[in-house]
Amino acid sequence: MRLFAALTPPAEALEHLDEFLEPRRAAGELRWVQADQVHVTLAFYESVPERKLDDLVERLARAAARRTAFETALTGGGAFPDVARAKVLWAGLDLDEPARTELDRLATGCRAAASRAGVEVDGARFRPHLTLGRTKFPHDVSAWVRLLDAYTGPRWRADTLTLVASYLGQGPRGRPRHVPMDTFPLSSA
């Protein structure tokens, strides 16, 4: 199974961002991510054997319970690998120091949960972001990044970790289809 652990902004935050971007979308060469697929990936598990799923779920529940919910907002943006040769355009999160620490520790906990359950985890450095669009070929997206730098959405409470199954090619126009499998509350204290 192809899975990932994620934070998902509430519908109101995603709708606010969508309203900001919608009148500008036709001007770019981006394939936009569907709003129901926008999330912050905390850990990516490319191939999870069915027999290890229960252990992973238990460990993710414990990892979430150890972290405290925090306030954030969608703000700013950037590109991977860089603005001049972008393949991915993303939005960032407004995080004060305690929130950034909680988010980093939650991502570490999600990766550790997989490792302890015997599930291979992507080893890339965690960089909190929400992928908004992709380009087929490297493209200069500096105008989009400048636009996103002027954006700040409504504040929301990040209080739930979600385990999501990703089915490649099964969504609209051959895109992935994401299906939430389980949710785990973060501590409120």
Image (cartoon, helix red, strand yellow):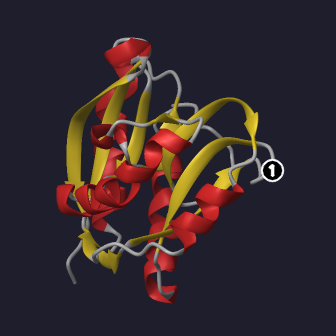
- Image quadrant holding the C terminus, namely bottom left
What's the residue at 21%, 47% (across, down)?
Answer: 183
Q: Quarter of the image holding residue 2?
A: top left
Task: Choose between 80 and 117: the one closer to the eye.
Answer: 80
What's the residue at 21%, 59% (across, down)?
Answer: 10
What's the residue at 20%, 78% (across, down)?
Answer: 188
Q: Quarter of the image holding residue 167?
A: top left
Counting from the top left corner in percent of width and height, residue 33 is at 42, 37
Q: How many marks?
A: 1
Question: Is residue 105 shown to the viewer in this render?
Answer: yes
Counting from the top left corner in percent of width and height, residue 106 is at 44, 63
Is 109 left, or right, of 123 in this rendering?
left
Characterize the local packing of mark 1: few (<14), some (14-19) or many (20 or more) Cα atoms within 10 angstroms: few
Counting from the top left corner in percent of width and height, residue 65 is at 27, 65
Classify mark 1: helix, strand or loop.
Answer: loop
Counting from the top left corner in percent of width and height, residue 175 is at 42, 20
Task: Choose between 170 and 150: the one closer to the eye.
Answer: 150
Task: Choose between 169 and 24: the one closer to the eye.
Answer: 24
Question: Is residue 115 shown to the viewer in this render?
Answer: no
Q: Is residue 89 above or below residue 101?
A: above
User: Circle 1 is placed at which residue position?
Assistant: 84
Is 188 left, or right, of 107 in this rendering?
left
Q: Furthest residue to the right?
A: 84
Q: Furthest residue to the bottom?
A: 97
Is 83 left, or right, of 9 in this rendering?
right
